[in-house]
Image (spheres, helix red, strand yellow):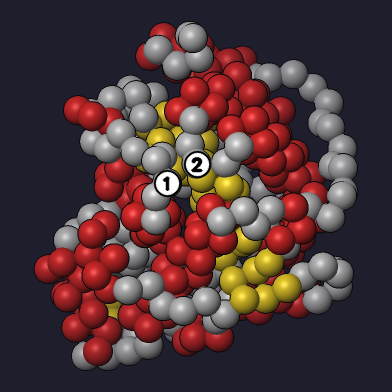
Amino acid sequence: MNFGYREVCLDHDTGPRHPESADRLRAIRRGLAEYHGVEYVAAGDADEELICTVHDPDYVEEIKTFCQDGGGNWDADTVAVEDTWKAALASAGLAEWAALSALEGDDGRETPFALGRPPGHHAVADNAMGFCFVDNAVVAAQSALDEGAEGVAIFDWDVHHGNGTQDICYDRDDIFYASIHEDGLYPGTGDVDETGTGDGTMTTLNVPYDPGADTVDYLAAVDELIAPEIESFDPDLLLVSAGFDAHRHDPISRMRVSSEGYGLLTQRMRELTDRCDAGLGFVLEGGYSLDTLTDSLTTVHEVFDGYQPSQPDGSVSEDARDVLDALVDQGFGST
């Protein structure tokens, strides 16, 4: 794979013991050093004018000034320093690079993966939250739309619901958003009946699984609902908001996805974009056990190098089946 990476993303210093630290990127880089076929791209910053088409311009100016003045605690979880805005511009720029590279046809072993931080999917239109300042995936999607894409799908497999992505895209018909997340976990959004409004009706698909959902449950959501709905949407580009905190060994969640499971999800996304004749790109979100973050991400990379992850045993849990049935009642998967 081709990985977007900038050293400035390490300068966003969240302080000791914060789970979203620069050590995440350092661990990923160490892990990837053991694999062949890894290329790094230092993409440029996202343009602030582009960011202001996704976020409220007053908010952009406020957070920019907050960082220039030395930063601090924006809220209980979201910490900034003077260099945070520079890192946020770089992180959004890496996501934009991933989107445009995929849109232009980079695939197979050249599939782009943006390794930026701070992450983005909790940043709503007019506020930072959940470690996030700029919604990198939506900025990337908007850039692709500006370059001629007629539709973009975002599949968010981070264990937390991407409330920011949903918030920004909820009434839009040119971005389809799908999320699998742990029900009741931060930020408490992403119910099955949150399906979009106005022009965006039925362009949001939330799969809020109970704690304990595993790889089999995740694959069922993709196979039965998410992939068919994205295929029906027929995007020119699919972006994966790739958080790895649903891993069974991640300290922040109670989900049971394996490293092999992320490889299987990646296979599903490759097959889906082949059917849609769409580009495929990845944007890093969460993942807070350094070992499992690295194992999962390198498994994604290996899939593009020919690795065939092993299929899990077992069947869909009763709790997961109830959620999938509720989504069918909402109108998904019925065509």
CA neighbours of label 2 inside 10 A, class few (<14), some (14 to 19), many (20+): many
Residue 192 vs 103, above or below: the answer is above
Of the pair 255 and 98, the residue shown nearer to us: 98
Q: Nearer the viewer, residue 203 or 66?
A: 203
Q: Quadrant of the rendered structure where residue 299 is?
A: bottom right
Separation of residues labelled 2 and 1 (CA atoms): 6 Å
Residue at 73% in and 40% down: 267
153 lies above or below 69: above
Quadrant location of the N terminus in the rendered image: bottom right
- Residue at x 53%, y 53% (from the top left corner): 103
Residue underneath mark 1: 149
Tell whether 95 sits left or right of 169. Answer: right
Query: Helix, strand, or loop for circle 2?
Result: loop
Q: Position of residue 153 (x, y in %)?
A: 46, 40
- Which residue is at 45% across, 28% downward? 233
Q: Is residue 192 above or below residue 153?
A: above
- The numbered dot on residue 65 is none
User: What type is the residue that disc 1 sits on?
Assistant: Ala
Q: Position of residue 156 (x, y in %)?
A: 50, 44
Q: SS of the residue at dot 1?
A: loop
Q: Position of residue 255 (x, y in %)?
A: 61, 40
Where is residue 290, by image quadrant? bottom right
**Image coords of residue 117 (percent x, y):** 49, 71
Label 2 sits on residue: 236
* For marks 2 and 1 on the same chain, the one whose residue lies earlier in the sequence: 1
Type of amino acid under label 2: Asp
* Mark 2 vs 1: CB contact within 8 A: yes
